[in-house]
Image (cartoon, helix red, strand yellow):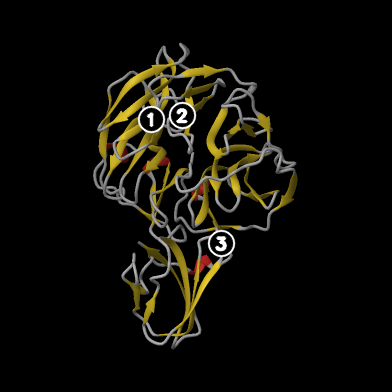
Amino acid sequence: MKRSRSFILILICGLFQVTALGQNEFIKVESNEDQPLYSIEFGDEMVGYIGGANATLLKTTNGGSIWKHVDIKDAPWVFSKMDIIQMDFINKDTGYAIVGDHSRRSLNTAIWKTVDGGFNWTSIIVTVNMVPWRIYTTGIDTGFVAGTAYFQGSVISNLSGDSVVNLHSFSWDGANYIEAIAIHADNPSFVMAVTNVPSVHRSFDGGLSWDTVTSNIDTAFNDLAYVGNGTWVACTKSHESLQITKDSGKTWKWLPTTFAYPTYSALCISQRDSIVSVGYSGSLKQGEIGYFHRSMQRYQSVPQKMHDVACSSITTIAVGDSGAIYVKNRFPLQYKTIEKTYGIHFYPNPTNGTLIFKEELKGKVNIFTMDGRLIKKIGLKSQKLDVSDLKTGTYIINAELLNSRSSIWDILLVD
């Protein structure tokens, strides 16, 4: 249920036609959990959250290589062991969670907000007749809340401060619900939502009014994302799971996947791999992670059914049953060696000019972009490093320690 806020990827229809087996590029990392994990969301480049069954909440502060259990201080849904169905974080500390019973959409759910990284939560008041199922924020106190309503079917409302207001109803069947909602990155006033009916709801004025189009899809939608160049991609509960549209949801075209014909549950847009999707294939519900790279669709089979995936500019992470977390490096570097919070090797970070290393280094310092492109080699003469010529952004630094055979990998933020 993920979207990319930091970039737009241009997808050319019909580009991906070849299927290839991946090389296990997604590496399983330890979660210390056996609960199903349902939702993953990044607050910034380094801080991310995973929500799962029985109030399970995990957090990373190093881009996803290490995850730790969050000891939630005070929230009634923790004591009642409710599931974290979906999350949406605006920054590293502030985000929202929809909690309830993941397996039963018709039961009441609740929306909660944290401003301290998941330790404390406050309730969001739902003032309208709806069962929230998805939240898509456009700011700290604004956004869209979608789901279902008794006797009103699929509905969309607005997040306004600590309340949910302004109900828009689309049918009278209470079994209909919104499964995903996304925003056109080039035109933020254009919002699209997809349902289990299936149908497509659209707003061209930022959610003030909506219309409904009947698509050529005959099976329920699972997820939706805007790719770029007027193209949207969705996954459905079908062996033709990946579908793309270039006419705002009226007609959809199957994007061929693997010969296993997986059913994808969620997708995200990756800077390196374009569309990344997760789900399962076969009657045994074996998990599958699919991704496109260099015009070829690759896939990796995993033992667990997968539920969600998130793409940051550093990494792509998929989560699923039995506490499964799979991480894929987003650049051709040994990212798995970055196992500590960024900035532990030097300061200030973020910086706008000079870095001071806390350890003695030898040789040269290599600086990479987040997609793995080497842009700078600097010879060290002291523990100070001039990076004033770097543009604002996020970088990777690699250097060798003076009294060790090991090298350091660290994240550099430039203001």
Looking at the picture, tell me which residue is in the foreground, 98 or 347: 347
* Residue on which the image places disc 1: 144
Q: Do callouts 3 and 2 mark residues in contact (Cβ within 8 Å)? A: no
Q: Do callouts 1 and 3 mark residues in contact (Cβ within 8 Å)? A: no
> Which quadrant does the C terminus fall into?
bottom left
Placement of 70 over or under 284, stated as above or below: below
Q: Do callouts 1 and 2 mark residues in contact (Cβ within 8 Å)? A: yes
Give the residue at x 64% y 33%: 243
- The span from disc 3 to disc 2 (Cα, nearest Å) is 31 Å
Upstream in sequence: badge 1 or badge 2 = 1
- Relative image position of residue 222 (x, y in whole percent): 55, 32
Please tell me the numbered disc located at residue 331.
Answer: 3
- Relative image position of residue 407 (x, y in whole percent): 49, 78
- The span from disc 1 to disc 2 (Cα, nearest Å) is 10 Å
Upstream in sequence: badge 3 or badge 2 = 2
Placement of 404 over or under 4, stated as above or below: below
Upstream in sequence: badge 1 or badge 3 = 1
